Image (cartoon, rainbow, N blue to C red):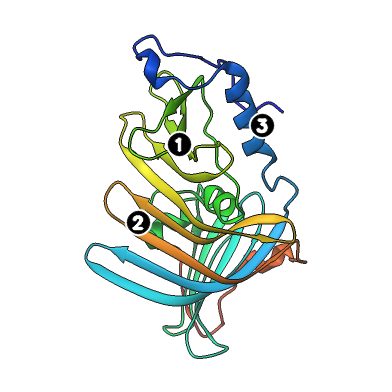
Amino acid sequence: MLTPGCSILKEQPCDAPDSSIAGTSDEIQRLLSMIARRNEDLKTFKGIGKASLKDGQELNSVRVAWIASRPDKIRFEILGIPGKSSASLSFDGTDYYFLSHREGKFYKGESDGAMFESITSIPVKAQDVVNIMAGRIPVIDFDSAVIERDELMTGYILFLKKDWFGKSEKIYFDEKKTKINKLEIFNFLGSLEYRAEFEKMCFVNNYLFPFVLSLSSGDGAFFRLETERSYADIPVSQSAFVLKSYDSYEKSYSP
């Protein structure tokens, strides 16, 4: 299975010492194929748990439920009193929606998928959020790939890079190269856009899901999701991702 953008598989970068290289082109392709196959048949999922968000010095925790449909549709319900939603946040693949049941306000706008950033200050698009929560690994469009030893932790790093002011990505494997611990996406300047860490993984219907997942940015924003229950391949109507305001609610089309 070929990964989009995989045009060059470099065994060794010209400026790297031999000791930093720990893989051949065949090994790189094996890892990329393993990543591509991970939960590839999963279409929909839902769950409930606790979300913690830190932006600056303040840390807030709420109960949250979610449904998602790959590749990029997702909806969160922020839970207040038992059985009641205090707010709804959704992306339907084209537009984002925010409905505050407590304040009676409704927001809708076009989006390139940056709906999640407006809430968490972490620059990760909705499609990446869906993939990560589905246990999949977002892979950038890249021109070169190399495997390196992780000097800080026991394991290996698959380093992907797009030439000509493109992004780069690091995918961190364990010593046996069978478990993915985290991934990092960098902009063309080499600054961290976001990091995803898989702290606890569990099987649900033969799919490997992150039950404890954290996302963070280079600016210190932090989001942690702890799953209590998760369900895979459940019926989901696509209309569930399109939120509508109550007639009595004030409408606004700017977040």
Residue bearing mark 1: 155
Does the residue at mark 2 contact the one at mark 1 (Cβ under 8 Å)?
A: no
Does the residue at mark 1 contact the one at mark 3 (Cβ under 8 Å)?
A: no
The answer to whether residue 161 is seen in the rendering is no
Q: CA distance from mark 1 to mark 3?
A: 19 Å
Q: Which of the two discs, 1 and 3, sits closer to the camera?
A: 1
Q: Secondary structure at mark 1?
A: loop
Q: Which of the two discs, 2 and 1, sits closer to the camera?
A: 1
Q: Secondary structure at mark 3?
A: helix
Quick one: 110 or 175, which is closer to the camera?
175
Residue extending farthest to the right is: 235
Q: Which circle's residue, 2 or 1, is located before the other in the chain?
A: 2
Q: CA distance from mark 3 to mark 2?
A: 32 Å
Q: Which circle's residue, 1 or 3, is located before the other in the chain?
A: 3
- The numbered disc on residue 33 is 3
The answer to whether residue 41 is seen in the rendering is yes
Quick one: 244 or 126, which is closer to the camera?
126
Residue bearing mark 2: 121
On screen, residue 118 versus residue 126, left or right, reads left
The residue under label 2 is which amino acid type? Ser
Residue 207: quarter of image: bottom right
The residue under label 3 is which amino acid type? Ser
Point out residue 25 in the picture as x, y percentages from the top left corner: 58, 17
Vertically, is 70 above or below 24? below
Q: CA distance from mark 2 to mark 1?
A: 30 Å
Q: Secondary structure at mark 2?
A: loop
